[in-house]
Each structure stands twice: as structure tokens, then as C-alpha cells.
Amino acid sequence: MKRIYLQQAKTQIARPNTIRDINRQIVLNYVRDRAPISRAEIARETALQRSTISAIVEDLREAGLIEEIGTGDSTGGRKPTLLRLRTNTPVAIGVDVAPRRTTVAVADLAGKVMKKVGFPSETNAEVMTRKIIDAVKAFAAECSEEDLEVGISVPGIADPESGRAVYIPYFGWHDWNIAERVTEETGLPATVENDANAIALAELWFGEESIRRTANFITILVADGVGTGIIFDGQIYRGEKGAAGEFGHMIVGKDAPVPCSCGSHDCWEAHASEKAVVSRYLSYNGNGGTGVGFEKIAELARGNDAYAIRAIRESASYLAIGISNLIVGLSPQAIVVIGRLTESWDLFEDILVQTADRSVRSGLPRTTILASSLGESPTLIGALALVLAGKFASAS
């Protein structure tokens, strides 16, 4: 699902010997990014004939993707009719499978969550499958849209082509055929993706403008583990069988405070995850805070608790080492850090920037490092983006 960059759209416009769908998607993206916008404005921007634009707009209206919202100011002739995305109509169901809790939501074309439900995640794959299917069926029964689709985000390696989660370390599941089962029992198209990849896709389409206009960037999801999503040339780089981006298992040190999901105490995940922050805090505090979770530690840090700040900054120093390695090896334009850790961004941003600056050779472009703007449910937005991005992505 490759993003269309409107600043380059004129070179992508399809001519009679190319696929009409490319023009259709370009028009849809103009409405998405520039709304409210008129047919005449789209024609001027793309150099497509007005008749072509009008035909495409009618197709998009009939498909329920865009709508007319009144008239704009006249520039000498008739007042132009303005267009925008059709919202408040369900088009996507997102399933966010996380280690502790699974969330299922339905959203409109703009990514606005209209309704959601959640339940504790199960360690039994069949029980989990049943709960997910029941929730999807319930939402589908409430929606009358024919093009409803399902996106599933999982904390492990996923192969979207086969519709299976290849391996989920937290649960120890192999070859979980979740997307296949959802489609079989609901009749809805479904796709499954690694959570970090899904978030990368969400950043590409729904993140802040500077990232939406960036063709090459890496997302880093810091949660119970550490996952990375790679965007090259406006699309996800998955590698063979979806296994690319497993940088959480690269060695960044030794004797981490917690084991990685693979069992090692050397991995980036073991040194920089939320679990590492909690373990360090309890160690510094003489274990007097047993039972304290990451959320509480982050709150204490924002209240200037010395132990909490120390735990976050030390964990961030290892996060910085990993980021430095990614910059040296892949030279992305930007790194986007995602997760609850970013709520304390001002406490450790300096560590990330300074470490990265030391590792980059003189004369090379500087990589921007920033916190995600996706909000408090990035993996859910990622699951929804698996469906929504397909509505806007290039067919080329």
C-alpha cells in the first residue's frame, strides 16, 4: 500500500494506456488532504480533464467515499461545489491484539473511532480467535456497508499474504491463522500485520504532516517489548515472510534488568522496554514499590521523583543506542518513537538526540527524532490503518 505524495502527483497521473484506478486514487487523496476542495481545483492541480475528474468524483460518491458539502466562493463563474471525505460511516474494523488486552473498534474513512470494545487477552489461541470473531460479527451486524474490512494488529511476526501470524513470542503461538478464520466466519476481507508495521502505516497516513510527507522513516514502538516498523519509499518494508524489522533482538548491552521475550539479557528489548523501566525503578527504590507499574512510574517521573526519572533516563540511554544503530545502518529521514514512554519525552529527548548526533558521520543529513502524534491507542489506529490505507494507496 504505497502512499501517493501529492507534490509528485503530476508525474504519476495515468494516461489512456495506464490504469484508471491510479487517477481515481489520486483524486481521492486530493479530497482527503485538501478538503474542502472543488472539482475545478483538482483539475488544475492534476492537469486531468474536467470530464475525467467529474466521472471519477461520481464513482467515489457512489462508492460512499466522498460527499458534497455545499458551495465555495466564486472566481467569476458559478460557485464551485466543494468535496470532502464521507465521515461517520463505518468502513473499517480494527483488532488490536496486545499482550494484556485486546481491543476491537469500528471507524470511518477519516480514522475516527465510532465504537469499540475490549477484553482481556487469552493465552489460548482458539479462545482468543473465538472472542475476536464474536466481536467482529457484532460490529458487522450493526453496519450495513458492503465494503467493510478488518485489520488485525499482533505483537509478533505476521505474514499478510497468508493471513497468518507466524510467531507471537509473548503467547508462544506459531502459525496463528487469525485473518483466515475471521474471513471464513464473517465473510469480511481481513488482513493481519505486525503491530510496529501497522503503526508505521498509521504514521504514514494519519501522523503529523511532517511524517506524512516523509518517504523514508522508522517507527519504534516501546511497550512490553521493542518493535520497529520500516517505511521505505512510502511503503512498509516487510522482508521475507514479514520478518523484517525485528531490531528488538539486536544486542545493545549485557546483563539487562529483565529478560527479552526470547530469553536473552542482551537484547535491545530487554534494556529499553517498559518492563526494563519498571525493574530499574524497583531496584533503585529498594524494591519498596513492588507492584508499581510503568504508568505509575511515568506519573512519578513527571512529578520529579528522582528514582523514576533515573529509571526512565537510563532505559532511554539504551533506546538511544538502538536508534543510533538504525540511523547508521539505514539512514532514515526520521525516527518516530511511539508508546507511553513518550509522555515523558521532555525527560529524555536530549539523550536520544545527543547519542544519535555522536554516531552520524560529518556531512550526512541529520535524522529527525520525534515522538508520535497518534495518541494513546497507536496500535489500534495501526490496525484500522491496515484497512484505511488501502482506500488511499497507489495501485502502482
Image (tube, rainbow, N blue to C red):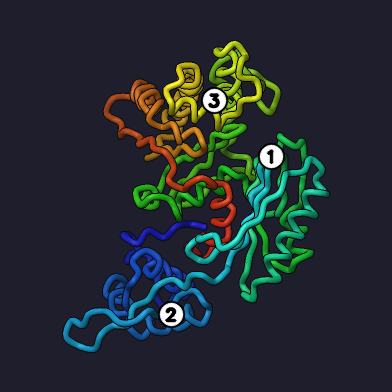
**Helix, strand or loop at mark 1:** loop
Q: Please indicate, yes or no, whether residue 247 appears anywhere in the rendered image.
A: no
Percent across and percent down for residue 100 are: 69, 39
User: Which residue was labeled with disc 2?
Assistant: 56
* Foreground: disc 3 or disc 1: 1
How far apart in space, not on screen, are marks 3 and 1 (Cα)?
A: 19 Å
Q: Nearer the viewer, residue 158 or 10?
A: 158
Left or right: residue 11 versus residue 102 is left
Percent across and percent down for residue 110 are: 47, 63
Mark 3 nearby-residue class (10 Å; few <14, some 14–19, many ≥20): many
Q: Amino acid at mark 1?
A: Arg
Q: Amino acid at mark 2?
A: Ile
> Residue 149: which disc?
none
User: Which residue was labeled with disc 3?
Assistant: 272
- State which tag comes first along the sequence, 2 or 1: 2
User: Which residue was labeled with disc 1?
Assistant: 100
Mark 1 nearby-residue class (10 Å; few <14, some 14–19, many ≥20): few
Percent across and percent down for residue 83 are: 37, 76
Tell me whether the residue at label 3 lies in contact with that at label 1, contact meaning CB atoms closer than 8 angstroms.
no
Residue pictured at 48% horizontal, 23% vertical: 312
Q: Residue furthest top?
A: 286
**Quadrant hosting residue 278:** top right
Percent across and percent down for residue 153 are: 63, 49
Tell me whether the residue at label 2 lies in contact with that at label 1, contact meaning CB atoms closer than 8 angstroms.
no
Q: From what the image shows, is residue 306 above or below residue 54?
A: above
Q: Nearer the viewer, residue 2 or 33?
A: 33
How far apart in space, not on screen, are marks 2 and 3 (Cα)?
A: 49 Å
**Helix, strand or loop at mark 3:** helix
Residue pictured at 55% horizontal, 12% vertical: 284
Q: Please indicate, yes or no, whether residue 216 appears anywhere in the rendered image.
A: yes
Q: Residue furthest left?
A: 76
Residue pictured at 44% horizontal, 42% vertical: 372
